[in-house]
Image: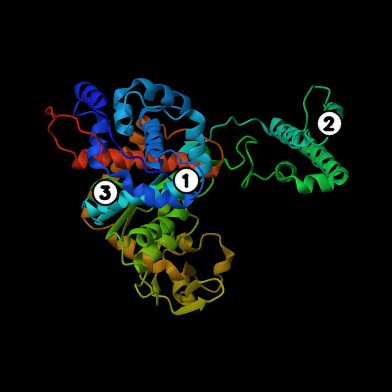
Amino acid sequence: MLQRKEYQIDFISNMIYDRLIPKNHILVKISETVDFSYIYEIVKDRYSNKGRNSIDPVMMFKICLIEFFYNLSDVEVVQRIKTDVAFRWFLGLNIDDEVPDDSTISHFRTQRLKAGDFENIFNGLVNKCIESNLIKTNRFIIDSTNVDANTNYPRKKELIMQAFEKFIRTLRRINPEYVNKKLAEYESLVEGIRKEDGTIDKKELAKLTRTQTEKIYEEMKTKIDEDSKAKHALEICQKLSSQIEAGTNKDAIVSVADEDARVSHKTPSKVIRGYKNHIIVDEESEIIISSTQTPANVGDEKELQKLIENVEETYEIKPREVMADKVYGTNENRAYLKEKDIISTINFYDNKEKEYKKFDLSKFEISEDLSYAKCPFGCQSIKTVKFEKTNKIKYTFDKTICETCPFKSDCYGNDSKFKSGRYIKIDYNYDGVIRDKSRNKQVDFEKTMKKRFKIERRFATMVRKFGLRRSRYRGLERTRIHIIMCNFANNVLRMVNLLSAKTAEYQPRVAIA
């Protein structure tokens, strides 16, 4: 049953807190800046109306916040609360009050609440920032950073063997003798495909593993279908076997311990493993307004529209301008921002150093209404055709002019497809690109782009202070909680810096309201 704690600090405890806790302590500033009581309304449906009273959910959430502010585990935070008077005061505990144990904290975070509840709590804090006039909707910045999964990444041969063992061990409580027999049989078969030099071909191992899992499933089909853990472990093992056999790296499983983690290559030398934290930040206050969490192989550009729509739907606000890195500058995103009447401050990739066999699209001028195009020689297209199925527009130029053009060799190159004259194709949504090319020539563009460092500063703070770089938990759902709490801690810190009193003069300590 949901119980709301009445924060009544007794005289002795209050006197101790008053003497020992400095006015400028970060937890004091947080308490003076943020009213956490809105959490009760968000979590009330997670509690039954029957049974014994629960531990106050606001106090439990504050414990989670302390963990991230001080980089503590569940066990460590319990020990600190027992001895740290500032922690006890922040939680509304008297000197002799009992402290929740670490299993209670873990249950609250993983069983009582879901990632969606943490997101709603985060949104509630952003609403308080809006009410305090901290978010101006002038310019928002979008970017992402990687969050390492809380796991190791074995080689594929080790990975497939781990997947098989995990699957077969889920059957141990059903038939332990059968499991031991199948493990020994599997190990023997693996040794049978080992080459003279001691190596094992990963595709051959994957095929062997898939065959064995299929045999086991046929022998214990009913039992496996009735056991959700066994069935899930089987599906992962079979999916992994198929991926390795096919030699595909698309959406490949990279860890049995964390099945949701993925790998992507940001550059040929920089590999991202795990997850991403995509955020949209108010440029002036550096408050994170919204975020999405994805596996690492999800492209940054795919989250731009979702972030903006989250902000609009949750808070009913829309930015005047959006700033982002080049990777977000897809035709689709630029057209979306144009349609939403949002100024796009997104640069284009620099293609100056790239050598082309023929003039590429960037050398041509497209009219604002997309009715015609002009070539580098200044000739206007003579025919415009729209292809509904592919959402493309084709511009064809006069062949007789092209044949005598001084740029013919650069324009045609060795491409035989221009026998009927030069043509180019663009997407229907290319009007966003045209607008942004004009925008990028404006005087204030470069000056504005230099302010992107502000979002990088937010990432740096969360990595350095709140442990964002590596997830505390495993799986996308729990990693979402880790990321949301880091974002929440960032916003709390920003609110304190923006709203708390500058003075650090001594004032008597009072009980938390």
Check disc 2 and report its element: helix, strand or loop: helix
Quarter where residue 145 is shown: top left
Distance from disc 1 to disc 2, alpha carbons, whole Å, reads 50 Å
Q: Quadrant of the C terminus?
A: top left
The amino acid on which the numbered mark 1 sits, given as a three-letter code, is Met
Q: Secondary structure at mark 1?
A: loop
Which residue, given by chain and number where applicable, does mark 1 sit on?
1
Q: Is residue 206 visible?
A: yes
Image position of 486 with respect to 197: above or below: below
Q: What's the mark number on residue 230? A: none
Viewer-side label of 1, 3: 1
Residue 210: x %, y % from top left: 80, 42
- Camera-nearest residue between 487 and 440: 487
Dot 3 alpha-carbon crowd within 10 angstroms: few under 14, some 14 to 19, many 20 or more: many
Q: Position of residue 485 (x, y in %)?
A: 40, 40
Question: Which one is earlier in the sequence, the residue at label 3 or at label 2?
Answer: 2
Task: Give the residue displayed 31% in from the left and 67% down from the top.
Answer: 341
1 or 2: mark nearer the eye: 1
Q: In the picture, residue 169 is in which quadrant?
A: top right
Q: How far across and down, in percent of the image, does residue 387 sit?
A: 53, 76
Q: CA distance from mark 1 to mark 3?
A: 42 Å
Q: Amino acid at mark 2?
A: Tyr
- The residue tagged 2 is 186
The reply to whether the C-beta atoms of the residues labelled 1 and 3 are less than 8 Å apart is: no
User: Which residue position holds label 3?
Assistant: 283
Please tell me whether residue 368 is drawn above or below residue 37 in the rendered image. below
